[in-house]
Image (tube, rainbow, N blue to C red):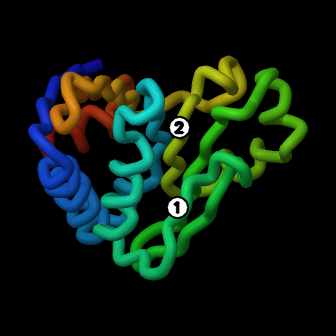
Amino acid sequence: MIVKTFRWADEAATSAFATRLAQHWLQQPASANMVVLLHGDLGAGKTTLVRHLLRGLDVTGRIKSPTYAVVEPYVTPCVQVWHFDFYRFGDPREWEDAGLRDIFATPGLKLVEWPDKAAGMLPQADWVLHLQTLDDDVREVVIEAPTAAGAALLQEVS
């Protein structure tokens, strides 16, 4: 596993990283078949990062937080994307009850906010991001890459 720490000075830095990642996936779509877990307090920038990533993947139209719907699917030129938000889950078994096992079994990019709320139910993550607010604009982001695919991608985009 490799771990890298980034400091994003503002939302433009978040956007730049997300755009770089999206461009990689547009050029190498097979590498977009990943599970990405997003940890951080409310307001840390998880949804903002996902929105910039989806825009970089040429998603048009409204990109909304899946807090109430649990999952929002998106079709991009290179990969099917599912954006999950488990914030409202009270029991990890709700993941199973919601029928999400089938989605995680299919190819595509799965972006998961509040993964701790589905503890023990999620497959192995390729990236685990920890976002922390240092002040109003600055974010410290630690990315862990526990799989070979995740480590290769982290080396490419950092």
- Within 10 Å of the Cα at label 2, are there few (<14), some (14-19), or many (20+) other Cα atoms? many
Q: How far from the left and from the top, in percent, is residue 152?
A: 23, 39
The residue beneath circle 2 is 113
Give the answer, above or below, for where 22 lies relative to 103: below
Task: Please identify, in this view, whether the residue under mark 2 or under mark 1 is nearer the observer.
Answer: 2
The kind of secondary structure element at disc 2 is strand
- Within 10 Å of the Cα at label 1, are there few (<14), some (14-19), or many (20+) other Cα atoms? many
- First in sequence, mark 2 or 1: give its number: 1
Question: What residue is shown at x 39% (from left), y 28% (from top)?
Answer: 128
Question: What residue is shown at x 14% (from left), y 44% (from top)?
Answer: 10
Question: What residue is shown at x 72% (from left), y 49% (from top)?
Answer: 68
The residue beneath circle 1 is 81
Can see residue 10? yes
| 10 lies left or right of 48 | left
Amino acid type of the residue that numbered disc 2 sits on in the rendered structure: Glu
Distance (Cα) linking label 2 and label 1: 14 Å
Q: How far from the left and from the top, in percent, is residue 7?
A: 12, 31
Query: Could you say which quadrant of the image residue 91 lies in?
Result: top right
